[in-house]
Amino acid sequence: MSYINIKNGLILLTLLSLCFLLSLKAFAKHAVRGTFPSLAGQQVRLVGFNGFNSYTIDSTRVSDQGLFELKYTDKDQGMGYLSAENNKSYFVALTNESIQLKGEILSKPESVSILSGKENKLFEQYAVEHSKREQALSAWTYLQNLYLTDSLFSQQKTSQQAIEAEMRRIKQEDYNFLANLNSESYMAWYLPTRKLVSSASKIAKYQPKEIPSTIAAFRKLDYSDNRLYKSGLLIDAIDGHFWLLNNMGQSRDIVLEEMIKSIDLLIESLVADETKLNEITKFLFNLFERHSLFEASEYLSVKVLTQNSCTLNDDLSRKLESYRAMKEGNTAPDIDFSGDVLKGGSIIETQSRLSDIKADYKLVIFGASWCPKCVEELHHLLPLYNKWQSKSIEVVFVSLDTDQSLFKDFSSRFPFISMCDYKKWDSYPVLDYYVFATPTIFLLDKNQKIILRPNSVNQMDAWIDYNIVQ
């Protein structure tokens, strides 16, 4: 055998050995052991986090003596929780160490002792001490406001200074704990991130001066970081970030401008990971929709759709395309009234199109009898219809029903045109308008230019009162 072949063989063997060792490391098992007499006979699970979802890592039945052992591997590293049959839970740090617990009730951390597990002991220590410091700060904040605003106390400068000094000391103590953690430990990342995520609502309400620095801290988060995905904090991090932006006490234009900055930074951190980009974009889009932040939805949609370096799944792509194709200022597609077309409960035999309706404005509503929100919105619309019609606004209801009798019964009391081809999401108008949820509403002018995408009948009515004077 030649020297070269021997050398190549040794290299191949080394590579295979390395792969084998890495594989062993990925599946190296660590244990969470517990002694909980009150759980005897119950099934207990170890649950981990993966982005927006949780999953069962391991499960077992607790012995008659209250003993259990659950295993996890390096791929489960992050945060997790123990869950018993009564749905009570206790959080643990899964950081490549075995953990020994002893206690009574999972949902009462004060009844649980951590016998071994360095990272978990740090987690427990900080959780207890930080909670006490937060309680003390709340009390001092109350006194500080009292001494600053109440004439009975406002002249007591020495007391004010003492209060400020004590608040600084408490904050510094908390900072020192986090700063002294080993930078290589999981807790050195997790605890500051958890503190940031949990602070959003309190800062907006009680410490508005800290809003800019808190937003800056949220923007520094790496949303592609696997530690965030495995922490159970992902939902709260995104919620808290954009909730704080929406409640920063600024004008709508400034809030949108700041949201755009955050969207840009978030998406740019995700473009190299298509799976996370799809998941987080979908969550963020739905978050904007729930809170009627439609301008942010539109910006997010265009931003992601114009990324050339990533691929979107079909469901997400359709949702985002609804804002690029159907944004305000664009011309909406015409609609052929096909299938069953009713007005005032009577079938209209002559087929026509949306463009045939002579009105200054046309309100197109996509909904269905099986959609509770659609039923509610159309119920609100009926008493307003005559008023709207007097202002040259016509309504067209496009139903996604699949049952003919249900559609006819539902739309029989509508004095405006209702149509249904019983194809649900495959209906041509639904596809042409990129509808992905019901109800979806578009206000068009006489040339079918999109004027507004109202999120409710009430918003539409307010727009009419403000913009149309007749």
Image (tube, helix red, strand yellow):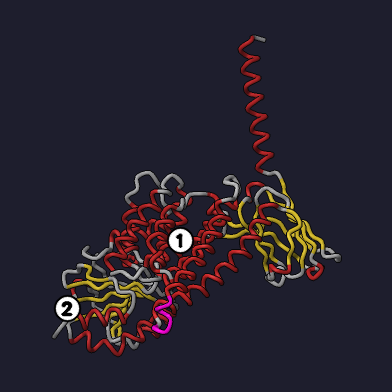
- Which residue is nearer to you in this view: 462 or 185? 185
Q: Residue furthest right?
A: 65
Regarding residue 315, the answer to whether it shows in the image is: no
Q: Is residue 336 left or right of residue 446?
A: right
The C terminus - image quarter: bottom left
Q: Is residue 312 left or right of residue 35?
A: left
Residue where numbered disc 2 is placed: 359
Percent position of residue 421, x then y: 36, 72
Which numbered dot is residue 302? Answer: none
Query: Local crowd at mark 1 within 10 Å, few (<14), some, or many (≥20)?
Result: some
- The residue at 65%/42% (across/down) is 26
Helix, strand or loop for disc 1: helix
Picture quadrant of residue 161: bottom left
Picture quadrant of residue 132: bottom right
Query: Local crowd at mark 2 within 10 Å, few (<14), some, or many (≥20)?
Result: some
Q: Amino acid at mark 2?
A: Ala
Regarding residue 246, the answer to whether it shows in the image is: yes
Helix, strand or loop for disc 2: loop
Give the distance between the C-alpha atoms of the residues marked 1 and 2, in whole angstroms: 43 Å
Where 55 falls versus 383 (above or below)?
A: above
- The residue at 26%/69% (across/down) is 335
Picture quadrant of residue 406: bottom left
Tell me, yes or no, whether the highlighted magenta stretch contains residue 142.
no
Residue where numbered disc 1 is placed: 238
- Which residue is nearer to you in this view: 139 or 62? 139
- Which residue is nearer to you in this view: 262 or 296? 262
Q: Amino acid at mark 1?
A: Ile
Percent position of residue 43, x then y: 75, 65
- The residue at 66%/24% (across/down) is 13
The residues colored magenta run 151-156
Mark 1 or 2 closer to N-term?
1
